[in-house]
Image (spheres, helix red, strand yellow):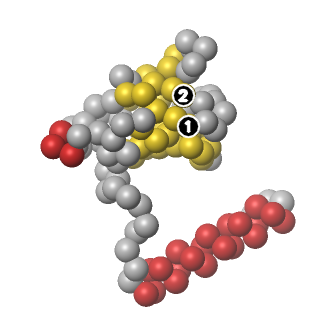
Amino acid sequence: MQVPPGKRDKLTTQLTWLAKRQALGLPDDRRHERIAPRDRYTLLKLPNGREYTATVIDISMSGAALHVDCEPPIGARVVVGATPAEVVRHVSCGIAVEFLSPLPADDFSENTRL
C-alpha cells in the first residue's frame, strides 16, 4: 500500500491492537452489538435539507455506519431515515453516526428500519 507515513502508523497501531485483542480473547469494546439489517437502504437528510440515498453497512442501538456519496462534517446533525443523529466519523465508504437517542432494545433486530 502506498499511504502517507501518518496513515501507515495509525493503521499499524490498529492492526496490532486487533491482533492482541484476538489473541487474548478480549471482547469488543463497543457499547452495543452491531448487526446488518435486512432492509439496507435509507435516506440521509443533511442540515441544509439535501437528501441522499444511503446503504446501511451495520447498525446498533446507538448508531450506524452508512455508505453514502457525501461527507458531512463531523458533528453535523443529520437524520437517518426518521432517526436524528450526529456524524461522529468518516469511514472509507461513507460516515458513521451516533443516534441522538438510542433505539429501543425491544424493537432492535435485523428487521429494524431507519
51 up-or-down from 88: above or below: above
Residue sitting at 41 percent across and 43 percent down? 63
User: Which residue, as the protein is rendered here, is positioned at the far bottom?
Assistant: 24
Which quadrant is the C terminus positioned in?
top left
Against 29, is 93 above or below?
Answer: above
Question: In the displayed structure, does residue 24 sit left or right of residue 39?
Answer: right
Q: Mark 2 or 1 closer to N-term?
A: 2
Q: CA distance from mark 2 to mark 1?
A: 7 Å
Residue at 66% from the left image edge and 73% from the top image edge = 13
Residue 71 location, quadrant? top right
Residue 53 pos. (x, y %): 48, 23
Q: Secondary structure at mark 2?
A: strand
Query: For the view shown, which residue lies furthest in the front direction?
Result: 101
Q: Is residue 10 above or below residue 86?
A: below
Helix, strand or loop under label 1: strand
Q: Which residue is mark 2?
A: 77
Q: At which x and y percent is residue 50? A: 57, 14
The tag on residue 87 is 1
Q: Position of residue 82 (x, y in %)?
A: 36, 22
52 or 32: nearer the viewer: 32
Q: Is residue 69 left or right of residue 59?
A: right
Residue at figure coordinates x 60%, y 73% from the top left = 15
